[in-house]
Amino acid sequence: MTDHDRLFKELLTTFFVEFLELFLPEVAAYLDPESLVALDKEIFTDVTLGPCYETDVLMQAKFKELDTWFLVHLEHQAHTEADFDKRMFRYFARLHEKHDKPVYPIVLFSYATPLREEPNSYRVAFPDLTVLEFNYRVIQLNRLNWRDYLRQPNPVASALMAKMNIAPQDRVRVKLECLRMLVDLKLTPAKIQLISGFVGTYLQLNTQEETEFEAGVETIMPEKKEGVMEIMTDWTIRGMAKGRVEGKSLVLQRMLNHRLGQLEPDLEARLRELTSEQLDDLSLALFDFTTIADLVSWLDGLK
């Protein structure tokens, strides 16, 4: 099973500054990115209700040009939860007490439903007195339109578009745009793998959509198509369970058809005879192929 909390935490930690630049540029403007320090997770036990909670992302940072530190607490929430506003306040109070620093609280809601707007404050008030007014920032992905982030040169946009409000007929377009953006960003292989894996997890296409997606790859400019095909191959194969040789063979056959043209039946038969390890090797080698003769030579060279 997919560890959704781990996936989001890895994305948000790796691209923390980019997350702020995308959704909270006013915070990014006064935060010194060189000062960022990731703090260990904080574990809180609710002594009255019993459950144990831990913070997702907790960063310590300085204000630009000031020797003053503050904390940014970024919480990921994958499902709706009653009294979540109260939990955010408890996090704030305990973090503030322990670290004795200002805390900037942010919540990222990633669930698909419900679409209603989530609260962004917790209030304690009497008829004659407001005792507490606690506010926090909310980014609710299912209320954001992916088109608004289409031209943002930001790795977080290329990933989180997959969790935004997407009409069924737009799913193929969004996945293609996510990968196109990822190629344009020219990130390190490890960061590309992180984002492509994220998109592959949260925007899985059915058979008909996969066919449309592959056709869409053909419309990409040649200098981008190569990168998109490499990402698509890597993430498709990684998403398969080990030992599913038939599935790997089918995916690679599709990639080779796109790259070299329609394969002859005898070549397709040879691909079906390859072992799982040989298919993994082929997934890397195929990007050096320019003709079908290159594929035949590679196959002939197998021991």
Image (spheres, helix red, strand yellow):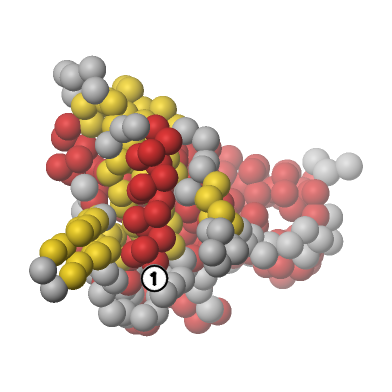
Residue drawn at (80%, 49%), measured in percent from left and top?
277
Residue 228 in percent (x, y) is at 44, 52
Residue 114, relative to residue 251: is it above or below? Answer: below
State the image quarter where residue 29 is shown: top left
Residue 252 position, x and y percent, is 64, 59
* Residue 178 placement (x, y as % from top left): 37, 57
Amino acid type, mark 1: Asp
Disc 1, SS: loop
User: Seen in the image, is 241 located left or right of residue 40?
Assistant: right
Q: x, y (%) of residue 141?
A: 32, 66
Side of 26 where 225 appears, left or right: right
Given residues 241 and 218, the one toward you in this image is 241
Identify which residue, 264 or 140, lies in the foreground: 140
The residue identified by callout 1 is 83
Q: Residue at x 50, y 74 (%)?
A: 205
Which quadrant of the view contains residue 257? Answer: bottom right
| One can see residue 147 in this view | no
Residue at horizontal 21%, vertical 47%? 24
Q: Farthest residue toward the front?
A: 128
Tell me the residue at 20%/40% (across/down): 27
